[in-house]
Structure formats: structure tokens, C-alpha cells
Image (tube, rainbow, N blue to C red):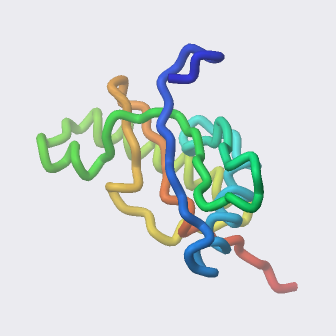
Amino acid sequence: MDNRLGVRVAIKKISPFEHQTNSQRTLREIKILTRFKHENIINIMDIIRAPDLNQLKDVYIVQTLMETDLYKLLKSQPLSNDHTCYFLYQILRGLKYIHSANVLHRNLKPSNLLLNTTCDLKVCAHTFFREKFVLT
């Protein structure tokens, strides 16, 4: 619970310094997500780290709490046509925003589409984001 905002949050623990690839992915995720402000993209509300850099082992990313993901929902029940259309609409809105920022999501799948109880959808798994370069 974020007592300042009065909302429930998810805290994602990352150990970025165990391997160089992890640190590069974490840095890329943080750089991209701090730029993104869209209702269909999971956001970073805060980043928590050890106060002493010599003890820095884990980083905690505070994000909007979403109750489930599309994979779990599909396993538990069939979707109505209305739900399918609404989820697809939100996925496309999120992807349009991501692509307009010249970023690609390289691991889009149902478990990376988070849902809350009001059927709001947010794209996550940003460690698979990659900035796209346009050659001229």
C-alpha cells in the first residue's frame, strides 16, 4: 500500500547486478518506462534502492497493482466477445504508444498483459523492450 497516494501497489524485486545482462536489461527497462505515460502501459511509481551504494544488491520497482494477467484469466474462463474486443482494443492502444516511441516489445504474450477487476489492461514485461533504430 502506498500510504502517500492511498493506492495498492506491486513491488517488483530485481537483482540487476548478478549478471551484466541483467543490469543492462534493468537499466533499459527503467529508462524506457520512466518516459512512458500511458494508461495501457504498466508504470513506474517509484524506485527503491539501498541508501548506501556499497550495499546495493537489489532494486525495487514500485508499480500499479494489477490483480491478474490474461493468461490466468483465459485458463479460468472463456471470454465473451465484448471482453475480447475490449482487451484487444487496449492491447492495440498500448502497442501503438510503444511503437510511436520507436520501441519494440519482443515478448508480447497473455502472461505479459496485466488485468484488474474492472478489465483495465496494461502491457508489462519491459525487460524485453528494445529501442528500434531507423536507418536513413
Image position of 116 (left or right of 131): left
- The quarter of the displayed image where residue 53 is located: bottom right
Residue in the image at 23% along x and 38% along y:
81
Q: Is residue 100 visible?
A: no
Q: Is residue 2 above or below residue 72?
A: above
Image mark count:
0
Residue 65 location (% of width, % of height): 46, 33
Q: Residue furthest right?
A: 136
Near-viewer residue (117 or 20):
20
Q: Residue furthest bottom?
A: 135
Residue 58 location (% of width, % of height): 58, 57
Residue in the image at 63% along x and 81% along y:
20
- The quarter of the displayed image where residue 27 is located: bottom right
Image position of 56 (left or right of 65): right
Q: Is residue 29 above or below residue 17?
A: above
Residue in the image at 55% along x and 63% along y:
15
Near-viewer residue (32 or 102):
32
